[in-house]
Image (spheres, helix red, strand yellow):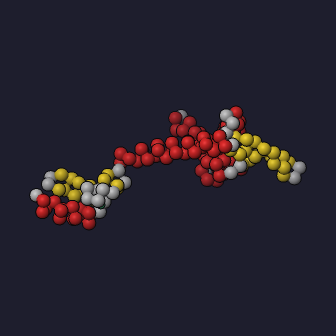
């Protein structure tokens, strides 16, 4: 149940990403979600969300005449673009703070290692290095000092 609502939110997030690329029809949005996320996007998700964005002044509908048919194109307003900029940078912060705790810092050069750090035992202590060369240089450096 919880995962389901998360996915719904992700679809909304994705709708914003699509609109950020440029104005789109509701149908284009749904088919892009299906194509790129590999999941069905129901009109009952997309249209109420577009309506909500419109109510907030983030999206502006305009008529696009294709032959005798009129379709509605949804485009982000300036406020909508601002909203997305904020949202996307928040999202970036969330992602980096999720990754941060699993980063190890190389004891020699100070670079950050996401995974598979090279672990070397130095005076009874396991130290993390980005590679064996850093571990060697580090060992060479400590030998003289101690
Ligand atoms: Zn290193």
Q: Residue furthest left?
A: 146
Q: Answer with the quarter of the image where residue 51 lies.
A: top right
Which residue is depicted at the point 70% across and 41% down? 59
Q: Residue furthest right?
A: 68
Would you place residue 53 above or below residue 96 in this image?
above
Is 44 placed left or right of 5 in the picture?
right
| Near-viewer residue (142 or 9) | 142
Q: Answer with the quarter of the image where residue 143 lies.
A: bottom left
Q: Quadrant of the C terminus?
A: bottom left
Which residue is depicted at the point 67% across and 34% down? 56
Which residue is depicted at the point 61% across and 48% down? 17
Which residue is depicted at the point 30% across and 56% down? 110
Splitting the image into four quadrants, where does ligand 1 fall? bottom left
Is 102 placed left or right of 95 in the picture?
left
Q: Position of residue 4 (x, y in %)?
A: 55, 38
| Near-viewer residue (15 or 93) | 93
Is 143 placed left or right of 81 in the picture?
left
Would you place residue 11 above or below residue 128 in this image?
above
Q: Position of residue 85 (x, y in %)?
A: 57, 45
Q: Position of residue 19 (x, y in %)?
A: 66, 47
Is 63 placed left or right of 21 in the picture?
right
Q: Position of residue 32 (x, y in %)?
A: 66, 51
Q: Is residue 14 visible?
A: yes
- The number of numbered discs placed on residues in the rendered structure image is 0
Q: Is residue 31 visible?
A: no
């Amino acid at each position: 149940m919880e995962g389901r609502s998360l996915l719904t939110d992700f679809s909304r997030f994705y709708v914003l990403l699509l609109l950020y690329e440029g104005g789109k029809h509701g149908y284009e949005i749904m088919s892009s979600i299906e194509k790129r996320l590999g999941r069905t996007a129901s009109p009952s998700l997309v249209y109420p969300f577009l309506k909500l964005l419109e109510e907030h002044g983030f999206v502006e509908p305009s008529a696009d005449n294709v032959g005798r048919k009129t379709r509605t194109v949804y485009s982000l307003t300036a406020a909508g673009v601002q909203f997305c900029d904020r949202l996307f940078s928040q999202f970036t912060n969330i992602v980096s703070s999720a990754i941060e705790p699993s980063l190890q810092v190389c004891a020699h050069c100070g670079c950050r290692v996401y995974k598979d750090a090279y672990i070397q035992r130095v005076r009874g202590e396991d130290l993390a290095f980005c590679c064996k060369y850093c571990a060697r240089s580090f060992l060479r450096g400590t030998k003289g000092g101690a």
